[in-house]
Image: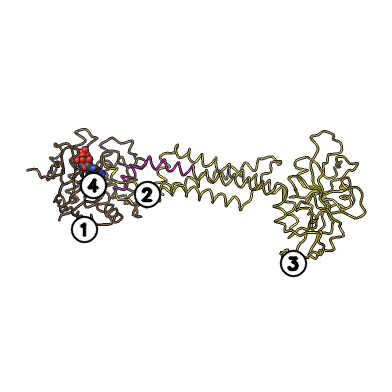
Chain colours: A brown, B yellow
Amino acid sequence: MKLIELKDVKKTFKDGRKTIEALKSTNFSVEEGEFVAIIGPSGSGKSTFLTIIGGLQTPTEGKVFIKNDKFSELEEKDRATKRFNEIGFILQASNLIPFLTVKDQLRLVNKVEKSKIDDDKVEKLLSELGIDNLMDKYPSDLSGGEKQRAAIARALYHDPAVILADEPTASLDTDRAFEVVEILARETKKKKKATIMVTHDERLTEYCDSVYTMRDGVLTKNQ
Amino acid sequence: MFLAWQEIKYSKTRFALIIGVVILISYLVFFLMGLAYGLAQENRMSIDKWDADGIVLAEESNLNINMSMFSKDQIETIDAYEKASLGVTSSVVQPQEKTDEESKINVTFFGIDKEEFIYPGVIEGEGFSEENEVIADISLRDEQGINIGDELSLAGMDLTIKIVGFTDNAKFSVGPVLYTDHPTYQRIRASGFGEREDEIISAIAVRSDSGEISDITLSDNELNLYSTGEFISNLPGYTAQVLTFGLMIGFLVLIAAMIIGIFIYVLTLQKSSMLGVMKAQGISSKYIAKSVVGQTFLLSFIGVFTGLVLTLATGLILPAAVPYQNNLLFLVSITTLLIVVAVAGAFFSVRTVVKIDPLEAID
Ligand SMILES: Nc1ncnc2c1ncn2[C@@H]1O[C@H](COP(=O)(O)OP(=O)(O)OP(=O)(O)O)[C@@H](O)[C@H]1O
Ligand SMILES: [Mg+2]
């Protein structure tokens, strides 16, 4: 099943009199259990592409479908709700909430939807990611790699269909970066997610099912 | 509340400082209010003690009881349910054996009839029965150390009076009241207007059957009837004083709201990228805004209540001469008002929260 599907999606920005075509008309889809990497130079439109899929901005033309629902056509508020339920964002390091412990980062999700925290689920998820011993630590007490694993835990906790990661390894050394990407790949397979990862580092794409290159707003599949 | 409380627990020093400021401001507000109320009470409590519906004064007195003067016989021209004649004069008294300036006391004499309703309840000693005996406000004992049986001489007069009893809540123009009978009052006042045949009084307090002063009729057009409320607000300086304090307290409450509002606003701005991340996660503006407002409520609640407790504690250890007094209604309303305006101040930040773009969280 296609969890993500883009049909003729295009994004232009008006900058004074000229318009910037950040994303040229694009058709694209990701199946469940598929791990996709997007590489490309700075300013080529990778983040624009990712945030349109995540519904943080709307396409100028075309439609985005998440689990076959017309995601991009939803009202702002409904899009936020759908994002909360179906999309997990993993951003560069330091996007954890500084005053919440690792466990409380997950608990926040329960608080928002007024449900009770499932301790077993938390335990299981955190031990899968190898950070169950850090449950009661604040982000400032974690290393870069541990922070990113906590961020992955947070993104996965709500069991979304889609994981969007924008340079999740930017602040990590090579070994940690490989670890984090390996975890992402493993969780994508095991939990049948559709995962898109934007990265600068081509070596990290070895765990991915398919690799795309973005250049000047044009997305092309490698080989 | 989850986010709000976790953040307070995490950044203890920062929030302790904010709460500290709230405590200080609310302490100041409560304390000023206690002083304002106490001072207002010292002006009016002897009047409230009458529990009268209205007061009759001489027409030309312009509502100033010190300028009101008429014959005691004129009481017959008033048709009311209950009437009490009252002579008012201020004076200076001094314990007999003392001569220094320090021991002189400003007092107000109330010349009254023992059978009429102004006659106060005695809480220590007994009522007056002979001439030159007085019942005094208890503050004379608490603040001046004067006891039952002590004799006081009147400044500029060859007259001594004897304390036979004490009553409470008897202050007028911020000084103690001495109650005495009409003949003694006449003698004290005579130093001002010389001997007269008829008895002179200042006012007649009246009660009506229904509590409405419209039920009371006067047939003497030298006299005028006023409601007790109107009389009190025309006490010299009373309204000006109440307004001054009221204005100060009002401004302080506003300043408190602004300070808390600004603190929360700055905190929200500092957190905006983190709030952006939360929005990218799909957490609604409503949830975030609620937690900002909830946090303000927590901070102001803790701060205002601590300020209140401190004020009450201070009230207990203040010397008797400080006119500080608590009033439950005022304490409750100021507490509520402070919290409500603080929370209103937080609504500044709600706009900011709503405007934060989750896109800022990326890059
Ligand atoms: N809100 C905006 N208004 C105007 N131009 C924008 C806006 N957002 C992005 N752009 C432009 O669109 C282009 C693509 O930006 P984008 O952030 O997607 O690049 P990127 O591939 O993520 O770059 P990087 O690797 O540096 O993160 C850039 O030229 C950028 O300046
Ligand atoms: Mg980018």
Task: Report helix, strand or loop for mark 3.
Answer: helix
Q: Is disc 3 surrounded by few (<14), some (14 to 19) or many (20+) residues within 10 Å?
A: few
Looking at the rendered image, the disc whose residue lies closer to the viewer, 3 or 2, is: 3
User: How far is mark 3 from mark 2, CA to CA?
Assistant: 61 Å
Task: Report helix, strand or loop for mark 1.
Answer: strand
Looking at the rendered image, the disc whose residue lies closer to the viewer, 2 or 4, is: 4
- In the rendered structure, the residue with mark 4 lies on which chain? A
Residue at which label 4 appears: A51
Task: Report helix, strand or loop for mark 2.
Answer: helix
Q: Is residue A98 above or below residue A121?
A: above
Q: Amino acid at mark 4?
A: Thr
Q: Is disc 1 surrounded by few (<14), some (14 to 19) or many (20+) residues within 10 Å?
A: some
x, y percent for residue B83: 80, 61
Q: Magenta stretch: residue B207 in it?
A: no
Rendered image quadrant of residue A79: bottom left
Q: Residue at x 73, y 54 (%)?
A: B231
Looking at the rendered image, the disc whose residue lies closer to the viewer, 4 or 3, is: 3
Rendered image quadrant of residue A45: top left
Query: Disc 3 or 2, which lies upstream in sequence?
Result: 3
